[in-house]
Amino acid sequence: AYTLLNSSLLHPAAIADFADCSRQTTCLGCLLQRACGWCQSSRSCQPLAASAVCSDNRSQAAVPEHCPACNASYADCVGCLADPGCEWHSGMAMCVRRGRFPMAEVAGLVTACPAMCEQLQSNCSVCLASAGCVWSAATNRCLPQGWVEQLDLLSVQSPWSDLSADAKFCQDCSSRTLCTDCLRGPRTCSWCYSPGQPHLGRCLPGLDANCSLEAGSNLTALASFTCPPVDECALGLATDCHPNATCTDLPSGYKCICNPRFVGNGSVCTRVCHPACQNGARCSGLPDYRCLCPLGWTGPDCSQDCGCNGHANCSGGVGICDACQHGAAGQSCEFCGPGFYRPDTSSPSASCLPCQCHGYGAPPELCNNSTGHCRCLGNTAGAQCETCLSGFSGSPADGLPCYSICSLDKRQTVTLLADTNNNSSWLIGQANALPGSCYALVSAAPASSASSPPVSLLIRVTFYVPCLAGAVHLYNGSAVAAGLAFHPSLLTRWCGTPSAVTSGDFLAPAGTAVSLVFESNTASSNFTALFAAIQCPECGYGYVCNRASGLCQAAASSTAAEGSAACPNNCSSGSGGGICRSDSLGACECSWNRTGADCSQQLNYRSFGYDSLSDADRLPDNPASVRGHPPRLYGHSLTRCGDYLYLYGGMDPRSGSAGGISHQLWRADLSSMLWSNLTDRLSSPLPGLYLHRAACHANDTLVIVAGRASPQVSSPDSYIFLLNTSSMQVKSMPMNCLPSRPQLVGFDMSLIPEPPGNSGLLFKLYIIGGIFMTPSYSWEPAETSTGPLVVSVYSDRCQCVGSANLNSQSPSNGPLAVFGHSVAAWRHTVYSFGGMEHDGEKFSPSDHLYAYDTVQRKFYKLPVSPGQVWPKPMAFHSLVSIGDYLLLHGGNASYSGSDAGSGGGGFVYGPARNWLYSVRCNQWLPLASDTVLVQGADAINSTLWPTADSAFPLVYPAAAAAPAATPNGTGRPPGYHYVYTYGGSVHGRVNGRLGRLRVPASPCEATRGSGAWCLAFGCQICSGECRPPGFAPASPSEPCSDISACSGNSSRAPACDTLLTSCSICTEKSLRNAPDHLSSTALVNCVYCNGTCRLAPNPSVNPCGSNYSALAPVQCASCPAGTCQRCSQQPKCLYADASSGGDGHLKCRQRKLDGSESDVGACSILSRRSPCGRSSAGGCTECASSVGGFESGSLGCAWLQSGQQSGGFCLPAAFIEPLCPDGACGKFALKSSPPLIGSAACPALNGTGCDNQTYCKSCLARCRGRGWCADSPAGSGAGRCLVGGFAKPSAGEAACASPSSWHFDACPPENECENGHHNCDLERQVCVDQIDGFRCECRPGYNWNNATRICEPVCTRGCNATQGRCTKPDVCTCLFGYTGDTCDVACDCNGHSNCAGPSPADRATCLSCHNNTRGSHCQFCSPLHAGDAASGQACLPCSQVCNGHSRVCLNETDRLKHANWPDRFPIDGSNFSWIQQGPSIDDAVCMNCDGNTEGSRCEQCSRGNYRLGFNRLLPCKPCQCNGHSDFCLPDTGQGCDCQNNTRTSCTDRDQRCREQQCAVCADFYSGKPTDGRQCYHKMGVNNYFCLDYRHSQKACGVNPGFLNIDVRLFVDIIRGAADLYLALSDRTFVVNNTVDANGFWSNLVSIDYQAAATLPRQPDGRRRRRSVVSDPPVLSDRVLEVSANPYLTYVSLPVSGSILIVRNATRRVLITIPCQSYEFSLNKFYLVVQGVSTDVNVSGIVFFRQDQNHINLLVFFSMFFSCFFLLFGLVVLAWKARQAHSRR
């Protein structure tokens, strides 16, 4: 409830100071004080009197209600403003309380008041125009509106009843033309009118006007108060009445009413039937308006019943029913007809319901006419045919037919009869098949022995079978003994993982029996196969009868087969479409401007197109090679060399050769398109190769490289074959650059020729990616992160010149490992796109585009801008170079979704599009028949491009570009590029089609308009059209766009903050450098900083601060290496299990920071552990249970069955697709495969083989070509698995006891529950025997889970799903940290321990703390660990917190304890019992950092050390300052503060400058200051140098000025003490940097004895023999060491002493070097003065002199006579000058 507060409930505040009343100027303000009252007469606030009377004896206001209200007290502006508490609101024309409204809206002064209404008396308009005024027409007065409101407030009757504020009533009465206007408002006018027409008249002033006098003689009537009534109907004023309506006059108007037979509102009247229609009948309308009776009624108004129970009309009369409807039948439609039923038989009028039989009811009745139960066909059952019969599967209710289950343990044999009694078709299938295989043999025959047309067998397969999960094989005849997928009788194969279920047809020849074999490796595959016997003339199923042959054929080929030409429509030759060559197998060769199967579609030079030149698929009965055509192939090579195409190798599923690998070489003439088999013309045979590569050199040499060889090849090596296409000479070169390397498959390469005369070098091969393998099935990926394998090929040999992927240890931006990709060269750059790329964890389809610069020898990973169109991840495609573009064709693209059976890591594969890539702009353009738009702009003209329906894109197409610009025999104009394709596989169907793709020379023009992509693709817009760069417009007045090429998206890298998904995306989508052709684009450097992607504008600055970061993609993976050997070469990396539990796959990962992991011998141990990559001696069980290594990724190993016997081999699961595409290798076993009957994970081939099978079903399911010979007694399940056929075992096998004991197509009945031939989990299930097999039922307390497909226990009291697991019936096992019967109670242990029970006391009793915690509630971290244990977080080892550089971290309290009392609180040993708890992450301080680091986290490099990059796990290295500085930049190692008179001459831009710092002496100094040597100040005779150093030294180089005068070297020590060192070599003394306790940096001198081992030259010019010793020489022999005297020390350097040391000199030291002992012209002397004072600066002077003690006469006289003759010459010259002057 709410209470309205008013003044009676409120009391003023008590104020002690009564004198404050006079300060208040308003009534309300006055009454806020309890002791004050308001006197209105004086408008003053006075103390409240006892009598409540003011000084003027008027009442004193004491409560707010007594205060006058502004709007009620004042009606005019002047009076309002006289009250200080009020002000006048001009807009509302009223008095308001002061301060309520803005100043701009109110008048605060009298001068601002508007004119008063009393001043506006004479004019109505002026009055009403003034705000706040109203006009009284009766009194002609202008009154203030406030007066009226005051009267209303006081409930006083207003005397002015004619007030108006409407300005129109100020108008004159004569201006009002209507009576209503005349008499409305102020009553000052009258209406004069004519009685006959009262609506016409005049408005006169006054209430008693004289109408006849003032208005006219005809206006005689007067109305002063109400208008006279008007009859609109009589006066014709009712104009809105409908013609079929009648007007009725009313007192106040009129009304229109529709006439009879019409309905409406009077204004609109509509014609209706009459009499009214009954029983729901409707009126027909124009023209006759009659009733249309519903079913079962008749008569004019439909009121008579026909007597047909409502199911028919009676046009012949009542009782004579027309055709019954609603499914009814009978004379009166009283029954239900065929196909209908009526549940309520007692009511004939009830509707008959159609039979709900889902299309499987037996005609004609379909179902019972009373119950609706269907008579089912098509192997269906149920009241509505909604289920399938026993032995059949399907879902008829969902439109899926019932098919005979293709059982793993049953082989079915069916013969179809071509008749019309439902015997002509049969459906078989399998859904969610267990791993294994099933078999069916089907044949067709005529229904009768009488002469009839031949019967063909149609097989229509609908499948969803991933190629890695299996395939549907179709063989000619019985294929029960066909152990390999490569078999001559193989007709076709279906597999694939498209985006939707795919179907395929195969029409077997007449009289052919076919075998369908379905092999599955996972439970995700399913298929159905319809077998139909069809014959002429009514073939059905979309096939038509060929009258010429009498056989059924596809409708598209029937016309061509019956016509005179082999090609469709004779290639439209009559209209210039193309030609049909006799050897093209029915394929047309179209003209340059035509395309299509029959060359009927127009094509211009701006369109992409495709031509099918020849097709081996048109000869399904015989091998294509019989007709001079290559067979169906994939994994082959197709190369253009000159005017020919060369096709070599590949896999031919129908060849029958071992492995199916072809060794044939075919050649196609481009002018005639005829094939020739060159295999027998070769000088030496070529081996069969698959997944190899080929290229052409110099138009006459075919280069074939590596590949998987056929099993007959004995050599395991990879070879390069050079084939001269003219002489057919074959030269083989082993790739000896791959030591101990097996065959290389799945790679791609580019051939780049070399200039002539380069030492016989022909070309270089740049090989990227691939897989190494041996005939014994050993596997290893080729690592490519550092660069491709570069092979130089000479005329007689090949050698590796850059096998970076084998030797280098420094990863770059290249892929770690990849196969199934495609490579193309553009100039000196090799591009690689897509493939199955390894990301450090596993192989998966990639969309990465790499560029390898062969000049810079560097990989680039090209960026993808946000929103840029980019191909999907794909593999096994083709990439060809065409001008400045790359054409991407074919392949398997990955789509979003999940496909566990594909082996692709969650990818679903489907056909890929064709793409065009602009090399200069880093822009992809999709080319597809569905006209895909690019960035919302126009699309490429590609409607004629091949699609997946045309068996494109291919999986293994080899394409070759033919960019010739001259016409050939087909009339191709210049400006077209032709790209040829052959073969490939789509959904397991291999084709033999030679296709030709037409690519315009300028893709810029291949558009229907212009768009943003035009500029982004490097083109320009001219007159609204997209044109190539450099295009000259026809009119100079319409120039082309001046926008720079590649504008719009291009290779410009995205903003770093938009790449937040992962570390690899952040670093890989932007480049630190770019290839040459993209160098002008501004690319940014992105750095991944602990979950965010940031910009790093300066590579030397870490924008991540203290967070870990990564600059390159390779740094995202902490240990990027593939092989164990490469991994072991990286510090802190270990090749081991990926998971900490030890059961994960092998990979290169970081080792534990606590030093507990060692890799000694790890590589050899792990190689023995994993059978992936070695022989299969361990069998299927060992193989499928292996985790594998880098080559297998997370998929592990797979056991591949190699035949019907026990043989097989182990390979990485990731390699199944390249080595066994499209299910070609049959079934295999994976670790993830569900268990099979009688086996844990593998088929019966593991060790025991088919000979030792003990279970009939596993024998028939896993051993193709074998049957079961049952032993007695019947039903025991005992027997033998023998080779045989349908009738009996094969010859040589043991015979069965009787024919009834032999079972080839199905197993005999047995009790699997008794003999153990079941797979029931007896702990949870009960085995129930059935007639056909067994059934596993859940035991009590267990329920079946369809998702997990196991019996799961039931906890009736519940079990918290997030905190526990129901492990047994009514047993809820709690997860860690929870307790209670239902696991709904959390232990009070902060998530680090289990507890004693659910009670409060037990809940707080922690049993054992985990996660490195301790405490009663596990609330503290253990010593040497850090974290927040109380919040449930795990405590990390200090080694991890300290970035691996310390194992001890303390909180601040413990750190101070150790700092003050290190002996009581040690941290060096293993006794840390004094530490009560570990610190939090924020408070942790790392102690004794190693690795030259410092800081609270050991995150910084200590002074004098540096670390490249931002990976703090790496140790810091000492600054490379050559011993002359203890400082450099900690993140680059540059910027040494060079001391000892050294300097750095290189610049930071030099990559090697870091190693060349302080390596040059400063000016006026000499020496080689590398490796800590000195720079010596050059000294001359009598040059003085001052000493002023502390803890340092002065180095001087003494250069004698005279050769025959002794050198006297003076060292005067003025203050302090010093040691003196003197030697003949500037390499003798080495500087050692030291830092004292006060942080002062100084140098100590040591002697390099080996550098001083060279003795000085002797005066006779001989040099003593150099003596290089490993140990320092004896001091008495090589070093003269003396102690200085206190005052003056004299030392002479004898010849035997090459090093002099004077210790502790404090005064003058004089060192004499005799000239007789040393050759001064050859020797210099190097002096080092080293201060030894600890507290005093060393100061003094160093100089040397060479004083002469006697006069050399020869010198004296030489100088004397030189001066004499000089003086004599000057005198003679002066005399001659005087003579010349005198003559003048």
Image: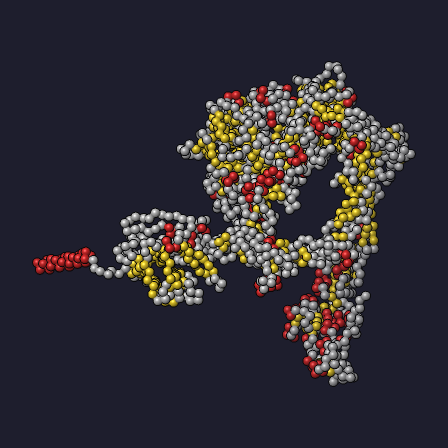
Q: Quadrant of the N terminus?
A: bottom right
Residue at the spot 8% in from the left edge and 60% down from the top edge: 1782
Q: Quadrant of residue 28?
A: bottom right
Q: Residue at x 69, y 24 (%)?
A: 1265
The quarter of the displayed image where residue 1163 is located: top right
Return the residue nearer the eye: 1477 or 1016: 1477
The part of the image, by quadrant, that contains residue 1135 is top right
Please give the count of numbered marks on the rendered protein. 0
Residue sitting at x 50%, y 30%: 734
Q: Kindly give the residue lying farthest to the left in the view shown.
A: 1783
Q: How is the image coloured?
A: secondary structure
In the picture, measured across the screen, residue 78 lies left or right of residue 1314, that is left
Expressed as whole percent of the image width and height from the top left, the position of residue 769 reads 54, 37
Percent position of residue 1559, x then y:
41, 53
Q: Position of residue 207 (x, y in %)?
A: 77, 65
Residue 946 at what x, y percent from top left?
A: 59, 32
Q: Is the residue 55 above or below the residue 636 in the image?
A: below
Q: Is residue 1009 left or right of residue 169?
A: left
Quarter in which the C terminus is drawn = bottom left
Judge whether 1722 appears above or below 278 on screen.
below
Of 236 and 75, the residue lying toward us: 75
Q: Residue 342 or 259: which is nearer the viewer?
A: 342
Can residue 1085 be seen in this snapshot? yes
* Residue in the image at 87% along x and 37% along y: 301
Horizontal arrangement in the rendering, residue 970 relative to residue 1281 (left or right) = left
From this viewpoint, is residue 199 visible? no
Q: Is residue 736 left or right of residue 411?
A: left
